[in-house]
Image (cartoon, helix red, strand yellow):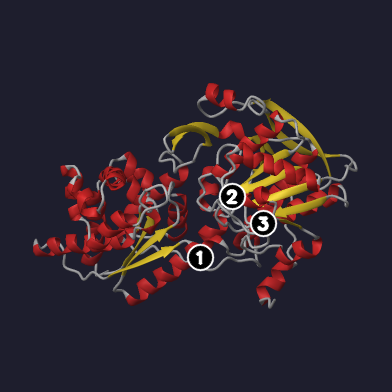
């Protein structure tokens, strides 16, 4: 395989570890924990893994030789930069405990465990993937581990390979499934530990003990570079308004972080839209008024950042989508469904561009729901802003020219080569997971904190997955899930955006972050996200 110059140089990068993981390791247990909500229900569902203590690792005077252990690893869900470094850290951690330990990768995600598809990960294989993006070392998948038959298939292959622990690298759903698996294996007394690692570029798997999910840093830096390039183009051509949709269906962390990094004219935050019950017309009017104000200053250009899931947070759109989901399930065709909409939803539907109407009615997922990620929200807003501006021009309230261009940045950021932060963070998460395994723990998520400090000052340990859980309705039934972390409107990152957005809207305050810097001064190469820095007031 031909390698680029960057790949060759990055292969030599040695990720940094917290001091506590650099030699002998001592385990310190904290207080017993409880779930963030629904304590009684979660406790009943997880009698063996509920209430376990927080764990912190500290440097020990000496390093004891541990018995050899075989471990399996699974990549679950969508890709995120740094997954290969979690596996590299896991491999190196196992070998540091005992050179005869083995690491097996299950192929294609959780289905590899069920279908007994695996490969042993040797040093030759691992060395090819250090500090690289993607999940291609073993592949990923979205199979849910929810059925006892699946769990028992896992026991079969683990017994065959003498695997004593599984590490599941995934997001909130994947780590919830990991905890269910850990609970089941404890009940069955089969001697298989399960440890999770926090992954998602969306940034919505975080809490007091998980400061950030891996991949968020790199993805936001990739998007911010391209946004900065577009801003430079907009400021050069001076005739286009760029509407940029960014990944993040359930939360707006990516849009907010990219907004803080690049300072666009408008950065929409879905959580604010929902909190203030902002209508589609209110959002369109706000954009149109900003376009008009900039035009009055001779600036017929600008940049708008839009979270992927925005449409589901707009109150009347949420109602319309729910009605369409229900009606299309019972009606034989689209006309029938549209004819049965409530008067309010019918009016909203009629106000939408024809292309968006089709996307709302034709594109369904296997559960019969609208595929929100396929709705071109950026084009919807461009068309509706144009109509609004035409009416404002007729009233003498707008004197400029408007030309809108739409973009969607998503997959461009999911498999980028990890930033130094993600390369270090992921390696530490994997190495740390090894210590949790060696300590006999199960039902824990690998936790690395104090991440705005230099890497050697990071705090390594573990958090019980049950501590992060609450009960939510999924597919008509209440289920235990890790609570998603939405953008907090009282949090420092959003407040920073809010206090600057009036100035950013009218003035051209663009920041051009440039590409990810892998080599150079620390202040350029190793800075954390604006979100982390603001949350930790550093």
Residue 503 quadrant: bottom left
Instruction: Please give the name of the residue rendered at 88% of the width and 42% of the height, measured from the top-left corner.
Output: 66
- Of the image marks 3 and 2, the number of the one nearer the N terminus: 3
Q: Residues within 10 Å of mark 2 (few under 14, many from 20)?
A: many
State the separation of the CA atoms marked 1 and 2: 17 Å
Q: Which mark is residue 73?
A: none
Question: What is the spatial separation of the Cα atoms under label 1 and label 3, in whole angstroms?
Answer: 24 Å
Tell me: 360 left or right of 214. Answer: left
Residue 516 spot, x, y in % from top left? 57, 65
> 524 or 411, which lies in front?
411
Q: Which mark is residue 199?
A: 2
Q: Nearer the viewer, mark 3 or mark 2?
A: 3
Q: Position of residue 464 (x, y in %)?
A: 64, 33
Above or below for 153 versus 255: above
- State the SS at label 3: loop
Could you tell me if residue 460 is visible in this image?
A: no
Residue occupying the far top of the picture: 40
Furthest-left residue in this view: 395
Q: Residues within 10 Å of mark 3 (few under 14, many from 20)?
A: many
- Asked if residue 287 can be seen in this view, the reply is yes
Say which residue label 3 marks: 107
* Residue identifier under label 1: 412
**Upstream in the sequence, badge 1 or badge 3?**
3
Residue 357 at what x, y percent from top left? Answer: 25, 57
**What quarter of the picture does the N terminus occupy?**
bottom right
What element does badge 1 sit on? Answer: helix
Residue 418 location (% of width, % of height): 62, 61
Residue at (15, 43) in percent of width and height: 343
Which is in the foreground here, disc 1 or disc 3?
Answer: 3
């Amino acid at each position: 395989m031909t390698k680029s110059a960057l790949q060759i140089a990055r292969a030599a990068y040695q990720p940094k570890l917290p001091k506590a993981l650099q030699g002998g390791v001592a385990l310190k247990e904290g207080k017993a924990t409880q779930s963030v909500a629904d304590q009684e229900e979660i406790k009943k569902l997880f009698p063996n893994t509920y209430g376990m203590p927080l764990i912190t690792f500290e440097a020990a005077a000496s390093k004891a030789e541990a018995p050899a252990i075989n471990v399996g690893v699974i990549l679950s869900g969508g890709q995120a930069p740094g997954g290969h470094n979690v596996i590299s850290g896991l491999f190196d951690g196992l070998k540091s405990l005992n050179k005869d330990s083995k690491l097996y990768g299950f192929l294609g995600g959780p289905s590899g465990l069920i279908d007994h598809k695996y490969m042993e990960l040797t040093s030759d294989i691992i060395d090819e993937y250090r500090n690289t993006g993607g999940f291609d070392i073993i592949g990923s998948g979205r199979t849910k581990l929810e059925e006892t038959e699946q769990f028992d298939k896992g026991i079969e292959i683990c017994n065959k390979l003498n695997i004593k622990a599984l590490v599941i690298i995934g997001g909130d759903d994947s780590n919830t499934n990991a905890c269910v698996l850990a609970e089941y294996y404890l009940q069955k007394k089969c001697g298989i530990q399960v440890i999770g690692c926090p992954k998602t570029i969306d940034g919505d798997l975080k809490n007091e003990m998980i400061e950030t999910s891996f991949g968020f840093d790199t993805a936001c830096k990739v998007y911010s570079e391209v946004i900065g390039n577009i801003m430079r183009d907009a400021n050069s051509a001076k005739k286009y308004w760029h509407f940029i949709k960014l990944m993040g269906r359930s939360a707006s962390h990516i849009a907010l972080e990219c907004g803080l990094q690049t300072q666009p004219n408008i950065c929409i935050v879905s959580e604010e839209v929902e909190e203030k019950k902002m209508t589609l017309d209110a959002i369109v009017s706000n954009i149109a008024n900003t376009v008009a104000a900039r035009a009055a200053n001779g600036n017929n250009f600008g940049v708008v950042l839009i979270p992927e899931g925005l449409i589901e947070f707009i109150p009347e759109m949420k109602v319309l989508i729910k009605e369409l989901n229900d009606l299309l399930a019972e009606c034989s065709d689209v006309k029938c469904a549209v004819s049965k909409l409530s008067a309010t939803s019918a009016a909203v539907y009629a106000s939408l561009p024809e292309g968006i109407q089709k996307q709302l009615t034709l594109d369904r997922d296997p559960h019969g729901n609208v595929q929100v990620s396929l709705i071109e929200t950026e084009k919807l807003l461009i068309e509706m802003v144009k109509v609004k501006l035409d009416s404002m021009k007729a009233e003498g309230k707008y004197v400029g020219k408007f030309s809108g261009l739409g973009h969607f940045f998503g997959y461009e950021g999911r498999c980028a080569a990890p930033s130094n932060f993600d390369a270090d963070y992921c390696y530490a998460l994997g190495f740390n997971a090894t210590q949790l395994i060696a300590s006999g723990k199960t039902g824990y998520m690998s936790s690395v904190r104090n991440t705005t400090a230099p890497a050697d000052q990071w705090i390594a340990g573990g958090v019980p997955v049950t501590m992060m859980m609450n009960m939510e309705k999924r597919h008509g039934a209440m289920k235990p899930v890790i609570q998603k972390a939405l953008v907090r409107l009282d949090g420092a990152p959003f407040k920073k955006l809010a206090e600057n957005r009036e100035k950013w809207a009218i003035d051209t305050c663009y920041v051009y972050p440039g590409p990810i810097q892998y080599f150079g001064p620390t202040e350029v190469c190793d800075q954390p996200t604006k979100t982390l820095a603001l949350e930790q007031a550093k």
